[in-house]
Amino acid sequence: MWLVAVCGMGLEVSGANQFIFVKFSQLYFISLWKLNRYMKFNTEEHLDENNKKLLSEIRNKMSVTFEIFNKPYFENFSINNSVTVYVNPQIFTNSSVAHELLHAWFRSLGLHGSNMIYLSAREKPKFSVVFDKKLCDHIGNCMDHYKIYPKFLEMGYVPEDFLSSKGMQCDINSIRKLRIQNNGVYSAKHLNSYIGNLISIYADHLPNDYSQHLAQMQSIEPELFDIVTEFWQAWENVDIENPDHITRTDFETINDFIMNIECWIENKSIY
Ligand SMILES: [Zn+2]
């Protein structure tokens, strides 16, 4: 509809405004040409050999489809046994598609994820006020990223192309501003931020120096610091491609984290 509106506006102008009409007409044809190209974009035709190989590996276990959209990033959405990868043709790169496909590959391994934390938190008011959906999704995303990054490099892509954010994952000032507790009463919002930031630091794939951040965080709340750190170290050690079905380390790692948090939170006043 907006194309018709632009064209109509051009037809009504005259005299000195003829120039504007020409410009609108050009805009119309350029936009139509771009739209046409955009709609015809077939992601699979633009995949490099590594992505094609990964795609066929994933398709052995789940269905994968591509959709185009015009957001300034790529994303994926998975439900049950299917995943949709959303691609913006104007900023298409194989490394961006690889990143999204690797999330799908990770899903195809059938491991337990951060949804376990969310579902568990939902049943307990004090837990859920800290571990909201956003934090649980963030933890899950970081867990994915830590495990898919080596495969991203193996595929031949460079570290700088793994994420669009290139700098440090959290700045020291946001750590200094944290007010976890006041007279023994804990802030859910600041606890949420504390845990989210600490996980971001651990998941950072680039060799940024977080020694100051970590020292500060440890001094703020040592016990919570140890719980999150222990969880992350355990996650680092989970062999996702050869899961041990007896010890079920992915399940155990997340379950231990939930239990440790529950224990820590039990005698705390949280608002
Ligand atoms: Zn990602």
Image (spheres, helix red, strand yellow):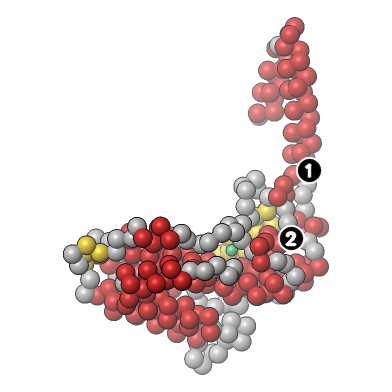
**Residue at image location 49% in from the left, 72% down from the top:** 202
Quarter of the rendering containing residue 254: bottom left
State left or right for residue 263 relative to residue 144.
Answer: left
Q: Nearer the viewer, residue 178 or 61?
A: 178
**Which numbered marker is on residue 37?**
1
Q: Residue furthest left?
A: 183
Q: Which residue lies furthest to the bottom in this view?
A: 246
State left or right for residue 65 relative to residue 121.
Answer: right
Q: Nearer the viewer, residue 199 or 143?
A: 199
> x, y (%) of residue 130?
33, 64
- Of the residues shown, which amino acid type is indicated by label 1? Arg
- Of labels 2 and 1, earlier in sequence is 1
For the residue with label 1, is its CB less than 8 Å from the closest atom of ligand 1? no
Quarter of the rendering containing residue 125: bottom left
User: Within 10 Å of the Cα at label 1, are there few (<14), some (14-19), or many (20+) other Cα atoms?
Assistant: few
- Circles 2 and 1: CB distance less than 8 Å? no
Where is 13 relative to 126, above or below?
A: above
Q: Mark 2 points at which residue?
A: 94
> x, y (%) of residue 20?
73, 17
Mark 2–mark 1 distance (CA, rounded to whole Å): 18 Å
Quadrant assignment for the N terminus = top right
User: Within 10 Å of the Cα at label 2, are there few (<14), some (14-19), or many (20+) other Cα atoms?
Assistant: some
Quarter of the rendering containing residue 146: bottom right
State left or right for residue 129 relative to residue 27.
Answer: left
> x, y (%) of residue 199?
46, 69
- Of the residues shown, which amino acid type is indicated by label 2? Asn
**Residue at image location 66% in from the left, 66% down from the top:** 159
**Residue at image location 18% in from the left, 64% down from the top:** 183
Q: Is residue 109 visible?
A: yes
